[in-house]
Amino acid sequence: MKQTFIIPFILLAFNVSFACSCGGFKTFISASKDSELVIKAKVLKHNYYNRQRQSVSKNEIDETEFFGHSVFVEVLEIIRGQEKRKTFEIYGAAEWKYSLDYCKSKIDGMEINKTYVFSLYQSVESKHSQPNENEDDYSLYACQESYIEYNDQTESVKGVLKGKNLDKKRIMPYEKLKNKITFYNNGDRCTRL
């Protein structure tokens, strides 16, 4: 009986000791104030990498082993920041069944050919880096709403955009979102690619 109680306690202590320190979850609009790049982009494909940095299909992944996961995107519009490339990779959290990577947002729910608005940070080499992730890539920080859905038909966005209720997804016209982001970020102009 003691072992049954001690094991979950040890696992909980282990989990807490390696978790990122957030200081509080940020909404998309507040997170965009600090991010290096805010873009509207279409997800072209999901990339998976094994520990040897080789590109593999999702079917080849053994969920008991650590693997890298990114999305390859086509930039449709730069809302804030600067980036010359039209396509690049965005890394989320390490996709692993037993992952303790709480420092990046998961990206496995992103749909191919769907458009999102992303609040991004330049990748840096750290213990949270994934196979093939380098400083030319971008990553999503976990302690914030890092990406939101864009609806082509209504030209609106949906996600945790503002407010104190962080469970409530709101819908906002895309132009209004851009105005809020550029207003909060010293009036940077948007760039259409």
Image (tube, rainbow, N blue to C red):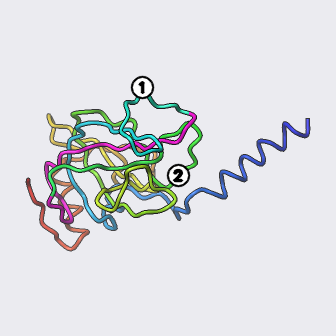
- Magenta region, residue range: 64-84
Instruction: Identify the mark at residue 102; answer none if there is no mark.
Output: 2
Residue closest to the far bottom: 186
* Crowding at mark 1 (Cα within 10 Å: few <14, some 14-19, many 20+): few
User: Disc 1 marks which amino acid?
Assistant: Asn
- The answer to whether marks 2 and 1 mark residues whose Cβ atoms lie closer than 8 Å is no
Task: Say what secondary structure mark 2 lies in.
Answer: loop
Q: Is residue 111 left or right of residue 168?
A: left
In the orientation shown, which residue stands out farthest toward the top?
Answer: 59
Residue nearest the viewer, comparing 128 with 144: 128
Tell me where residue 190 sits by quadrant.
Answer: bottom left
Q: Quadrant of the N terminus?
A: top right
Where's residue 11, x and y in %? 72, 46
State the residue position of label 1: 59
User: Residue 150 lies in what quarter of the image?
Assistant: top left
144 relative to 155 in the view: left or right = right
For residue 61: magenta? no
Q: Position of residue 24 (x, y in %)?
A: 51, 61
Q: For the residue labelled by badge 1, is the local secondary structure a helix, a strand or a loop?
A: helix
Residue drawn at the location 41% of the way across and 44% of the way down: 168
Residue sitting at x 24%, y 40% = 43
Please tell me whether residue 101 is drawn above or below residue 122 in the rendered image: above
Which of the two residues, 20 or 187, is positioned nearer the viewer here?
20
Whole-percent x, y for residue 122 in the image: 33, 62
Marked residue nearer the N-terminal end (2 or 1):
1
The three-letter code of the residue at mark 2 reads Tyr
Q: Nearer the viewer, mark 2 or mark 1?
A: 1
